[in-house]
């Protein structure tokens, strides 16, 4: 089972004004996972940087601590790393391993 299915997040594509958009539906997700729909507003570079930072944290290596503070997408939702979790709005939302897998699945879906 894919991570998005496990978290009750639905990936889908929508065509609007001749442009294809990839979206995440979190309506059936548990309350704590509903906030994960923010991923669909991230561009590929930010997603890749987030995956890279998670990998560094998991390997107990130095990472860009200002990464989440410098990206508006993250500051709006008060997102932070609280090892081993990724926190949204002060709540330990998702384990970093699961977030990393979800981000990789999302990139694959988006670019398919």
Image (cartoon, grey):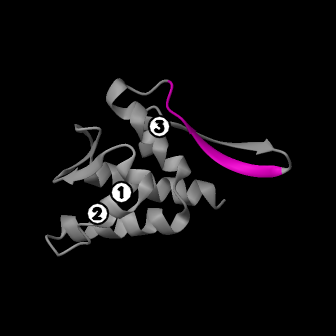
- Type of secondary structure dominating the magenta stretch: strand
Residue 22 at x, y percent in the picture: 64, 48
Q: Secondary structure under badge 1?
A: helix
Residue 16 appears in which quarter of the rendering? top right
Q: Secondary structure under badge 2?
A: helix
Q: Which of the pair 100/17 is nearer the observer?
A: 17
Residue 75 relative to residue 20: left or right: left
Q: Are marks 2 and 1 in contact (CB under 8 Å)?
A: yes
Q: Which of the pair 44/78 is nearer the observer?
A: 78
Label 3 sits on residue:
5
Label 1 sits on residue:
100
User: Which disc number belongs to residue 54?
Assistant: 2
Decide whether residue 24 is among the magenta residues.
yes
Nearest to N terminus: mark 3 or mark 1: 3
Name the residue at 26% across, 71% down: 64
Tell me, yes or no, if residue 68 can be seen here. Answer: yes
Residue 9 relative to residue 68: left or right: right
Residue 102 at x, y percent in the picture: 42, 50
> What stretch of residues is rendered in magenta?
19-27
Residue 111 relative to residue 42: left or right: right
User: Up-down: is 67 above or below 89?
Assistant: below
Name the residue at 43% across, 28% down: 29
Q: Which of the pair 106/45 is nearer the observer?
A: 45
Name the residue at 23% across, 67% down: 65
């Amino acid at each position: 089972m894919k991570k998005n299915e496990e978290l009750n997040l639905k990936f889908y594509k929508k065509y609007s004004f001749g442009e294809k958009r990839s979206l995440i539906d979190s309506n059936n997700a548990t309350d704590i996972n509903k906030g994960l729909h923010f991923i669909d507003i991230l561009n590929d570079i930010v997603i890749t940087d987030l995956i890279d930072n998670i990998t560094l944290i998991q390997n107990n290596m130095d990472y860009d601590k200002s990464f989440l503070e410098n990206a508006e997408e993250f500051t709006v939702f008060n997102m932070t790393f609280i090892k081993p979790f990724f926190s949204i709005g002060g709540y330990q939302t998702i384990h970093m391993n699961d977030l990393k897998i979800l981000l990789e699945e999302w990139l694959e879906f988006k670019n398919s």
